[in-house]
Amino acid sequence: MKKSSKEINGNNCKETTFNIRKNKLYFNIFLILIFTMALFFVTIQKVETKRINVKVGDAAPLEIRATKDIVDKQATEQLKKEASDRVEPRYRLSPSVQMTMKATIKEFFDTVREFQLDQSIGVSKKTDLLVEESRILLSRNEYQTALRMESDELISFENIINDLTNQIMAAGIKEEDLEYEKENIEKIFESIDISDNKKELGISLINNTIQPNKFMDEEATQRRIDEEVEKVEPVIIKEHQVIVRKGDRIDSNTLDLIKELGLLKEKEGYDRRTVLGIIVLILLLETVVFGYIFYFNPEILEGNRLLILLIIVTALILISQGIYNISPFIIPVSTGALLIAILLDIKLSLIVNIFFSFLF
């Protein structure tokens, strides 16, 4: 049975409509691909042009400002070092040193008394024996001076030595101050009203037994340093603050700041992480925009309305790319959103406006 002419015409219209829609789908996909590629190259160029290829000692090709708040680590560490250097070391006295010194001096005087009581040998022999037994190194004349003292005289002299020892050691002696203290002992004995032989003996007794008894308390000092360092506030470089001016030399700290801000171009070509990040961002944003269009404004896909949308967005991106270098505050984002609201759809303009906010 032959088909009527109306049926044939109806089938031809359906086929023609299907082909038109099919071609329109391909055309829309082609437009989206072109738009995606254009958006990718514009975005990556915008990111890469912010990066500079410099090294320590180079002159800055342009004025570089911070793109975000960052900590100036080198300046902060310098402040911490200065705070640490200002801390006075903490010292502690070692009582065992003074006790050992006094015990050695007492042992010397006790030995002298023992030899003085022995009347069976002469001073010369006593001197020889005292040289052998004494732990304090003295001259032969100084040993004889001690042996020739009367009992009361020896006790009085021993008290002088003990008093001076207590005074000197109570204040504490640091290792680096030992020689100074020995010189000071000589000056002290010059002011004491005793014979020259006793002065020489007293100086030798103390100088040959005196030891440092004031040592740095490393734990207490370190605790104090840690406390002062913790008080140091980090040096913050604020967003838009000038890091280096055009023509200034790049030092190691400046280079570290540029690198931390992501403004340093460390190798030729595009960074793979940057490329991947831009692709992911664009695909997510396009999924939101075109997903909204597909589900809530499918009529935009008909006719030339999608083309109008892409032309507006692309033009706005290209215009903004040039204007951004002058001032980011005059980018016509609101103009693009307004055009889309007038020509296409108000809700879509809000979605596109969010799209712009991520790009700029």
Image: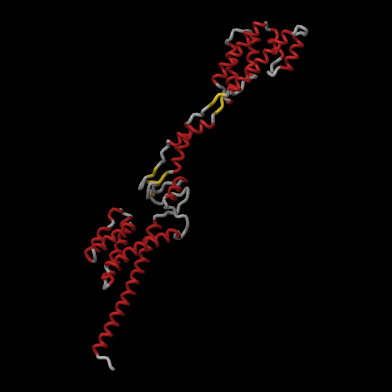
Q: Identify the residue at horizontal 47%, vertical 48% (top origin).
A: 57
> x%, y% of residue 132?
74, 17
Image quadrant occupied by the N terminus: bottom left
Q: Identify the residue at horizontal 43%, vertical 49% (top origin).
A: 260
Please, which residue is most extreme toward the left here? 342
Determine if residue 298 is in view: yes
Quarter of image, res 121: top right
> x%, y% of residue 99?
61, 19
Q: Nearer the viewer, residue 148 or 99?
A: 99
> x%, y% of residue 73?
45, 43
Quarter of image, res 76: top left
**Residue 59 vertical placement versus 41 (above, below):** above
Quarter of image, res 25: bottom left
Q: Identify the residue at horizontal 26%, vertical 72% (top origin).
A: 304
> x%, y% of residue 302?
27, 73
Please, which residue is most extreme toward the bottom here? 1
Determine if residue 65 is in view: no
Q: Nearer the viewer, residue 332 or 243?
A: 332
